[in-house]
Image (cartoon, grey):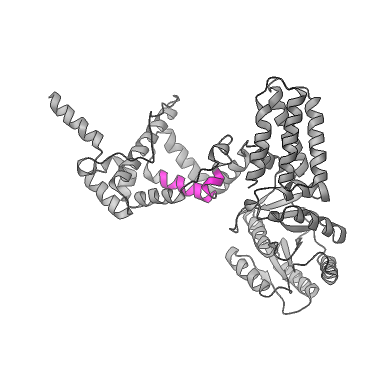
Amino acid sequence: MFDTLSDRLQGALGGVRGSARLEDEAISRAMREIRLALLEADVNLNVVKEFVAQVRERALGAEVTKSLTPGQEVVRIVHEELTALMGAGSSKLAVAPSPPTVILLAGLQGSGKTTAAAKLALLLRNEGRKPGLVAADLQRPAAIDQLEQLGRQIQVPVYREDTSDPVGAVRAGLQRARAEQRDVVIVDTAGRLQIDEPLMEELGAVRREARPTNVLLVLDAMTGQEAVNVAQTFQERVAFDGVVLTKLDGDARGGAALSVKAVTGKPIKLVSVGEKLDQLEYFHPDRMASRILGMGDVLSLIEKAEAAVEEDEQQAMEERLRKGQFTFDDFLSAQRMLRRMGPLQGVLKLIPGLGSQLKGVDIDEAQLRRVEAIVLSMTPQERRLPHVINGSRRQRIARGSGTTVQQVNQLLESRKQMEKLMKQMGKGKMPTLPGQLDLGAPQAPGPNGGSRSKSKKKKRSKARR
């Protein structure tokens, strides 16, 4: 997400980030690099000019905060201006004073409206709401069937009518939703070209019938500046309240996200960050600015963790870790929690300072699955009491998981070191990290599946006797 833009902006600020003094020439050089980075990211030209001028003016006249160096102050200014550019403030949807809250989705053909409707319904359902979906896309073949299939997956009702009139379909759908006491109704409309006069008039008629609380324009983030042009045209014809950006995870440039608020005056409300139905998030400009500048996103990381971990599950694990216990059952539980938070590489990038270190690094999630297979090949007793795993048990576990004894040995040693760290932390001590912990280089096996280093120790002790 925004990898190209992020690399360029971080490079542009790299020369001033640690500077104790800032000269005009250094600021001018950084501003030129920022300007080029934004233009290459397909950001609107007028937006780029205004952004660079604002940052330059503030940087030259900045009063340096006591806790920051002048270079850090420039980075802070860029962060604040990026946040303002993308629309500082709340991204929450408006709620009707009396239910249902009606959300109308509009946009071009192929922008991802139907999938976005289902993702939004799931997001609201997870918040404790009772959403319903109205199928009003009567232009695209199989659009209603697709929405019904998605509705079954997320367990949200879809209201459809056998009619060719979208206004009638919306009217009937809203009546059924009210009868079933749905507090949110999402209307999926037909995709259209912004220059198609009949379809634009139809959208206006649907809007008048639905009387929506929120009108959201769905835009494909990967189309860059074209998405902004579409938003501008829709704003002139059918006013909308906010934007849903789809395919943001595949957008390396970021032109749409950085331009749409400045050009249309309407904020980005939601962003789709993956293909799965649970990968729709509220948009937070300050957090996105932090990600772009390589500062991580701790708040999003915490929210993901809270959503993935049950409270009683978290308390039980905390209690065991305080006692310095770390069994393979704990390992399985922790790994599954991490998976519920989303793709591992995406989660790690939210940790401040870690994103830049992961550039070009491919996280092998298949390796995690192999490790899980080793643990699942253990008996419940072995997972609970790892010290009982002797040589023959290691060979059995390796055969059952399709791995080698060396890999089993490696995992057992890593768990032992982790437990040692937990005990030190539980006693309030600074943990002493092992000198070498190479998870990619298993120890050579000794007799009966034990490690060779242990075999040598036994021989030395016999020699001393």
Q: Residue at x 45, y 37 (%)?
A: 319
Residue 340 falls inside the magenta stretch: yes
Residues 60 and 388: in front is: 60
Residues 50 and 217: in front is: 50
Q: Is residue 62 left or right of residue 114?
A: right
The furthest residue to the right: 236
Q: Position of residue 160 (x, y in %)?
A: 70, 74
Against 350, residue 249 (above or below) is below
**Quarter occupied by the C terminus:** top left
Q: Position of residue 34 (x, y in %)?
A: 73, 37
Against 386, residue 102 (above or below) is below
Q: Is residue 460 left or right of residue 106?
A: left
- Which quadrant of the figure has residue 128? bottom right
Task: Characterize the magenta stretch by its predominant secondary structure.
Answer: helix
Residues 331 and 447: in front is: 447
Q: Position of residue 357 (x, y in %)?
A: 54, 37
Give the extent of the magenta segment: 331-347
Against 177, residue 258 (above or below) is above
Q: Residue at x 49, y 47 (%)?
A: 337
